[in-house]
Image (tube, coloured by chain):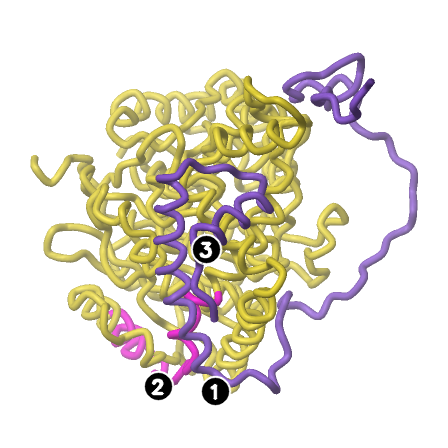
Chain colours: A yellow, B purple
Amino acid sequence: MSLNQLTAHELHDKLKNREITAVELTESVYQRIEEVESKVKGYLTLTKEIALEQASAADTGFQNGDDMPPLAGIPIAIKDVICTKGVRTTCASKILNDFVPPYDATVMEQLHKQGVVMIGKTNMDEFAMGSSTENSAYQITHNPWDLDTIPGGSSGGSAAVVSADTAICSLGSDTGGSIRQPAALCGVVGMKPTYGRISRYGLIAFASSLDQIGPFTKDVTDCALVLNAICGKDEMDSTSVDVPVPDFTQSLVNDVKGLKIGVPKEYFAEGLDDQVAAHVQNAIADLEKLGASVEEISLPHTDYAIATYYIIAPAEASANLARYDGVRYGFRTEEHTDLISMYKKTRSEGFGQEVKRRIMLGTFALSAGYQDAYYRKAQKVRTLIKSDFDAAFQKVDVIATPTTPTPAFKIGERTDDPLQMYLCDVMTTPASQAGLPGISIPCGFVDNGLPVGLQLLAPPFAEDVLFRVAYTYEQNTEHHLRKPEINSSKG
Amino acid sequence: MATITTEGVSHVANLARLEFNEEETQDFTEQLARILDYISKLNELGTDEVQPTSHIHPLHNITKPDVVKTSLPRDEVLANAPEPEEGYFGVPRVIDTE
C-alpha cells in the first residue's frame, strides 16, 4: 500500500521510527490528488505550499527525537465551513467567494498544536445546507465508490477525500447528520460528538443549537485520536461544556460483553432499503455474538424529527445568515440604489437556491403570527424527541440503527424535490436534536458495491461507549479495509 | 397551521432581505407550501404541557470577567470588506441631504 492509503496511527509509528518523512507522506497525498481529484472533486482549495512547510516542521521534530503528538505530520483536510487563518474559506457559497479569515477556528489552533499538515479545504453543500453536496456553488463532488452517485452531505468533500485516500483524515460539521450520513455513503468512519464537546468558535454558523464539528477517518482508532485533539471547553464558545476530556484511545477495547444495545423499531420502518436493513441487522447480530445483549426499543417521536428539524434549523439559519449583508465581508452587488436594495441584491445574487429556501422557511417560522404555531411547536416536539432518548438510555447503553435509509443515490436524482432530499436525514436528525454523540462505521456493501453505514448513538458525553462498540465491531470485521476503485457505474 | 400565498412569500422575502422575480416567487410558494404541509404533521401531537427545548444543556446567562484584550488589527478586519473607506466599512448613503 502507498503511504496515503494508511491510517494516522500506522503513519505515526512510521514517522516516529523514521521509516518515512512527513514530506514524503504529504507528497504521496498530492500525487494521489493528481491522479483522482479530477474525478472526485472533493477539494475547493489545495494548500500544498503550507502543507509542505508544515510537513518539514514535523520532520524536524521527529528528527530531533522530540515527543511528537499522534497527529504530527498527518495530512488532514478541512471542511470549508471552518475558518482557516489566511486560507480562503467559502462555505461553498458565492457570497464568501473571496473571504480570507483573519483568525483560525479553535479546532484549527488545536490541530496546529498537534503539528498536522493541512492538505486543503473540502467541498460541501452551501452553508452546510444539504444532504448530497450538490448545493455547492462551485462543483459537484463524486462518490469514490461510484462516480455517478453523490457522496452525501453536507460534508461530502470531507468524506470523499478520506475514502479516495486523498487525505488521511478530515474534519466536517454535523447539524442534522452532515458527518454521519456522508461517512456512511462513502464507507468511512464519521463521528458527531456530543453538542458542547468541541468549540464552535470559527465554525461558520448554520444552526447554533445543533452544529458540531467532528472527524472523518479510515478507522475507529484514528477517530479517537482526532477527537482527542479537538475536544474541550473553550472560552471563545460559551456553549462548549466544561466536562472532563478523557483519552478516548483508552476506550478502544475489543470487548462488548455486558453492553446493552437498543434497536429502535421506528428506524426499521417503511422507506428503509432492504439490503441496507439486512447489513445493519447482520452487524447488530455480530455484536450480539461478540457478547452484547440486544433488545428492541421504541423512540415513538422519530417520525416527527424531520418536521421539527426543518423548522428549528432554518429558523436559526435565518438569524445566523443575516450577517451576510455586503458590508463587512463577502460579496457586494454591483447595482443598487440605496442601502436596502444593496442588502437585497447582495443576498439574492450571493446565496444559492437551497440557502434562500431555508432562509425563507426560517423567516416564515419566526415571523409575527406564526412563531407559536411553528417555531415554538417544533421546540416542544424537540423536547419529546429528547425525552424518547432519555427514556431509552435508562434501559440500554447504546442505540444501533442504519445511518441512512438507502445507499448513495445518483447525482441529480433528488435535486428537483427539496422535501425528498430532506427525508435523507431521517435517521440522523433525531440524535442531533437531542445533542447526542453518534458515529457511523462501515458495516457492509450492497450488491452494486456501495457502502452501508451502521449508526451508533450514546448518551451525552458517552463517546467512550461508542468507541468501545465501534472498535469491537471493526476488530472483528473487514469492511473498513475495502478501498474504492474510483470508477463510474457505467464503467 | 396556515398555507402560504405568493403575497406571503413576498412579505417574508422582504423580512429576510431577499428579492425574487415572479417565477421564483411562484416556485418558492409551491415548495414552501409542500414543506409546510409536511410539517403540519406536528399538529398530531398535543404539546400544551410540554416545555420547549431551545438548547440541550441547561446553560443560562454565561458570563465572564470583562477583561480588555487586543482586537484584530483594523487593516486585517477591513481586508475582507467589499468597499472599505478611510478605515471604515463603506455603505451606500443612508441619510438624505437636501
Left/right of residue A48 with respect to residue B56 in the rendered view: left
Residue closest to the far left: A491
Q: Position of residue A95 (x, y in %)?
A: 52, 29
Do badges 3 and 1 share one subunit? yes
Q: Mark 1 or 2 closer to N-term? A: 2
Q: Amino acid at mark 2?
A: Glu
Q: Which residues are magenta?
A: A283-308
Q: Residue at x 67, y 53 (%)?
A: A232
Name the chain under label 2.
Answer: A
Distance of label 3 from label 1 (alpha carbons): 23 Å
Percent x, y of residue A276: 21, 64
Q: CA distance from mark 3 to mark 2?
A: 24 Å
Above or below, A29 relative to A126: above
Residue type pointed to by label 1: Lys
Viewer-nearest residue: A131 or B91: B91
Say whether residue A217 is visible.
no
Element type where label 1 sits in the image: helix
Give the residue number, with chain letter if any, for mark 2.
A295
Q: Residue A29: horizontal and vertical position, in percent? A: 37, 27
Residue A181 location, quadrant:
bottom left
Q: Is residue A370 above or below residue B48?
A: above
Question: In the image, which disc is placed on residue A395?
Answer: 1
Report whether A242 appears left or right of A410: right
Measured as percent of width and height from the top left, residue A489 is found at 11, 40
Contact between labelled residues 2 and 1, with CB atoms less than 8 Å apart:
yes
- Dot 3 lies on which element? strand
In front of the other: A408 or A472: A408
